[in-house]
Amino acid sequence: MNTSDGTARAAIDPARFAQLTKQLELGTVLFKDRSGSTNTELAQLAATGTAGHLSVYYTEHQQAGKGRLGRSWVTPLGSSITVSVLMVPGASIPTETLSWYTMLAALAWSRAAERVGEVPVRIKWPNDLLAGEFKICGILAQMVPAGSGYGVVVGTGMNVDQSREELPVPTATSLRLASSRAIDRTELLAEYLKELVNLDRAFRQVSGSAQMPLPGFEGRSLQELVSEKLATLGHVVRVEFPDGRSLEATAVQLAADGALVLEESSGQRTHVLAGDVHHVRRADGKYA
């Protein structure tokens, strides 16, 4: 695996990964050199009962991945962390709160990337992460049948080692570009899972409430922790809906159900859910 300038990319080391995550009590862990879509394949394993809670499916090269709204997600070999995790919290969490797992993953990645890459990373509602004003990670969560109930497969693609020429759009960046330093992908993946496992455990302890203080997180709720990281808040944004309608207003709050609260110049407030929108962009044209 080589970079665009011909230097070698280090593969994820399964043995070292296992050592770094041995205390996490992960489920099935699958590493593949190539995969069509980690989300699709892990969802199939969940449906057959082959994979359970905290199962991890990782690939060095995703060839047919899909992002939100069916957008393609293809990564150069060895340049990113493309991983899906199956979350099956069981009866401890109401089904309607499973949508918060997108934000759990976003928060876990932001904390892990800041610790390993020493780069401030913020959340762009509803499912992206930013380094500065550039996209560095995309998230796709989908509900799947699991046992007698439902779970969530949370797929993420973190740009780690791409050069500027390897990035698909001008609004994207990678941790290497943002930090100007080499990033250990094995360490970064392990750190993401540590953060995700801790957040999941705390979220289940409060029965999936986004408003209750999470144990082990200094008395702050998931809603508060995500809001602190939410780059969208305070900006005038343009929301485009699937039926062609649009709304331009200031993003003022993250609601308890995960909706983005928008306030128009008249003072009228509107709650928009991630599943109800097609695009959310800053009105000044910037990605954040």
Image (cartoon, grey):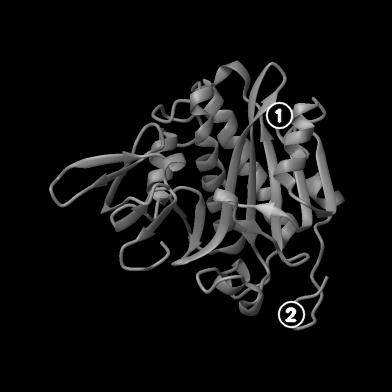
| Image: 73 above or below 52 | below
Image position of 235 (left or right of 90): left
Q: Identify which amino acid the numbered label 1 is placed on.
A: His
The amino acid marked with disc number 2 is: Ser
Tell me the tag on residue 4: 2
Q: Is residue 26 visible?
A: no
218 vs 61: above or below? above
Name the residue nearer the viewer: 218 or 238. 238
Q: Nearer the viewer, residue 259 or 253?
A: 259
The residue under the point 72% across, 35% down is 43
Left or right for 224, reference 113: left
Lower sequence index among marks 2 and 1: 2
Q: Residue at x 20, y 49 (%)?
A: 264
Q: Residues within 10 Å of mark 1 (few under 14, many from 20)?
A: many
Q: Is residue 35 visible?
A: yes
Q: Secondary structure at mark 2?
A: loop
- Toward the front, the furthest residue is 243
Q: Is residue 266 above or below residue 8?
A: above
Res 173 quadrant in image? bottom right
Residue 151 horizontal/vertical position (percent): 64, 28
Image location (x, y in percent) of residue 287:
42, 64
x%, y% of residue 228? 38, 48
Quarter of the image for residue 164 reads bottom right
Q: Which residue is tagged 1? A: 53
Q: State which quarter of the image contains the N terminus.
A: bottom right
- Quadrant placement of the C terminus: bottom left
- Check residue 274 in the rendering and tell me which mark sits there, or answer none: none
Quadrant in the picture for residue 283: bottom left
Name, please, the residue furthest toward the bottom. Answer: 5
Outermost residue on the left side: it is: 266
